[in-house]
Image: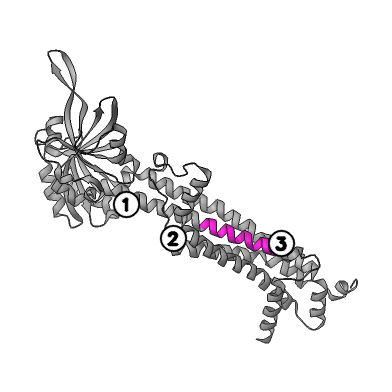
């Protein structure tokens, strides 16, 4: 115990070596700062990626469904049978029919392509969060035969529309008239404006009553398909496949993991690549401890020789310098963890500050699908990063400490 105490005492003293030039102290501080910055950046980046993934999933599923069952030709005549089988499944919470088709909204000289979704306001309430996303009006204002429409706030701005204004919806399905073949169109009144915070939905999605959509697309009593809300969204592939088999097939099934798989796959790939790249930065900073300890060993040749003369074993000398390097790595890692957590929790404020300073938009909703930059600190990620950085620092102490243990007292004292 006394030997270990002595090694810790000397190792702690050597963390701030008093040299004639102070250069060794400077290199030690740089090594510690490098680990701190590397660990902090790694925690912030992974936290932002985690937050982006969670926020993207929540915003996608706010208006998209956990799973859908549609007809092969976008027409599902026996949708009530499918709905009954779906509701019999214990994993299904709610089911809502829908009609979906492409169209174009026109207001004077302004026009924009949209995905038109016909829905039953009462049933839609159970499968999506549209009601919570409304900034004006309500989905309940969509009444059969009134030809009302609910659009996103950015789309309303682009078309110069507000609540109560009228717009023309034009669809690609044509109608034959004495004047020739003309595209089908209908005048709708804006009864609601929503904002999901995801550019893809806010700019390109419009809701109408399902009966109005059926008349416009001439589907009669048929629908495009049914949307399912599940108790466990991660079980969507299995549940929707089971329901399709129960109804006898003849339908097309999809779920959120398939429709938006590219988003989540790219996020996972980016997280892995960023972790490896930034871990290399932490590794370079950690291995700077090698040069620091080599210089300390060179500077402390006389001290090592005296310790050996007084009876210190090579393993004790090696322990002294391993303790010194480990303390540098531990303090750098701890500082990086604290700085990284604080930075991750305030990353949105930091980005906004940088945007004001640089006078440019760093997070564009058209590019990143989100209008803000979320962050989610996971204890597992922080622990993994901290342990990896600490182990790299620990490994970097072995060679310099071994060199110190091989110091020969006679040769070291010859020039003292």
Toward the top, the furthest residue is 179
User: Dot 3 surroundings within 10 Å: few (below 14), some, or many (20 or more)?
Assistant: some
Q: Can you see residue 290? A: yes
**Which quadrant of the figure has residue 193?**
top left
Magenta region, mostly helix, strand or loop?
helix
* Residue 399 placement, left or right of 100: right
Q: Name the image quarter holding the C terminus.
A: bottom right
Position of 331 relative to 7 (above/below): above
Give the residue pinned by disc 1: 58
- The residue tagged 3 is 27
Q: Is residue 224 visible?
A: no
User: Looking at this rendering, what residue extends furthest in the right direction?
Assistant: 415
Q: Quadrant of the N terminus?
A: bottom right
Please check the rendered image and state whether residue 288 is part of the magenta-colored stretch, yes or no. no
Task: Say which element carries label 3.
Answer: helix
Q: Which residues are magenta?
A: 26-42
- Would residue 308 appear left or right of 130 to someone viewing this image? right
Q: Which residue is mark 2?
A: 377
* Residue occupying the far bottom of the picture: 2
Query: Which of 102 and 77 lies nearest the eye of the viewer?
Result: 102
Q: Position of residue 394 (x, y in %)?
A: 63, 67
Counting residues from the start of the chain, the first of labels 1 and 2 encountered is 1
Q: What numbered label is drawn on residue 33?
A: none
Q: CA distance from mark 3 to mark 1?
A: 46 Å
Q: Position of residue 366 (x, y in %)?
A: 39, 39
Residues under labels 2 and 3: Cα distance?
31 Å
Q: Is residue 382 left or right of residue 244?
A: right
Q: Which one is earlier in the sequence, the residue at label 3 or at label 1?
A: 3
Q: CA distance from mark 1 to mark 2?
A: 17 Å
């Amino acid at each position: 115990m006394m030997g270990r105490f002595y090694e810790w005492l000397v190792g702690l003293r050597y963390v701030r070596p008093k040299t004639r030039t102070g250069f060794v102290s400077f290199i030690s501080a740089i090594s510690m700062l490098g680990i701190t910055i590397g660990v902090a950046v790694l925690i912030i980046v992974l936290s932002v990626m985690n937050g982006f993934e969670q926020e993207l999933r929540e915003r996608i599923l706010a208006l998209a469904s956990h799973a859908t069952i549609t007809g092969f030709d976008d027409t599902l005549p026996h949708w009530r049978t499918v709905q009954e089988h779906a509701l019999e499944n214990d994993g299904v919470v709610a089911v809502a029919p829908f009609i979906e088709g492409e169209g174009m909204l026109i207001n004077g000289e302004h026009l924009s392509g949209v995905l038109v979704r016909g829905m039953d306001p009462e049933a839609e309430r159970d499968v999506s969060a549209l009601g919570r996303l409304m900034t004006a009006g309500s989905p309940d204002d969509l009444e059969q035969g009134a030809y009302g429409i609910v659009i996103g706030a950015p789309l309303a701005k682009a078309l110069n529309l507000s609540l109560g204004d009228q717009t023309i919806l034009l669809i690609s399905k044509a109608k034959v008239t004495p004047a020739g073949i003309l595209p089908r169109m209908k005048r709708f009144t804006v009864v609601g404006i929503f904002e999901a915070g995801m550019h893809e939905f806010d700019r390109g999605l419009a809701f109408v009553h399902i009966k109005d959509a059926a008349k416009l697309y001439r589907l009669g009593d048929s629908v495009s398909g049914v949307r399912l809300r599940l108790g466990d969204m991660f079980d969507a592939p299995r549940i929707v496949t089971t329901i399709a088999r129960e109804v006898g097939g003849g339908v097309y099934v999809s779920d959120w993991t398939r429709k938006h798989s590219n988003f989540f796959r790219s996020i996972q790939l980016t997280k892995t690549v960023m972790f490896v790249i930034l871990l290399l930065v932490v590794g370079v900073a950690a291995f700077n401890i090698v040069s620091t300890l080599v210089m300390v060993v060179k500077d402390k040749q006389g001290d090592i020789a005296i310790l050996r003369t007084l009876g210190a074993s090579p393993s004790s000398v090696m322990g002294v310098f391993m303790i010194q390097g480990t303390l540098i790595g531990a303090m750098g890692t701890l500082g990086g963890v604290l700085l990284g957590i604080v930075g991750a929790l305030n990353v949105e404020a930091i980005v906004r500050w940088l945007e004001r300073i640089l006078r440019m938009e760093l997070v564009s909703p058209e590019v990143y699908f989100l209008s803000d930059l979320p962050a989610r600190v996971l204890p597992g990620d922080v622990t993994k990063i901290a342990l990896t950085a600490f182990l790299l620092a620990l490994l970097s102490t072995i060679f310099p400490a071994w060199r110190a243990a091989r110091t020969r007292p006679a040769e070291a004292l010859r020039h003292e």
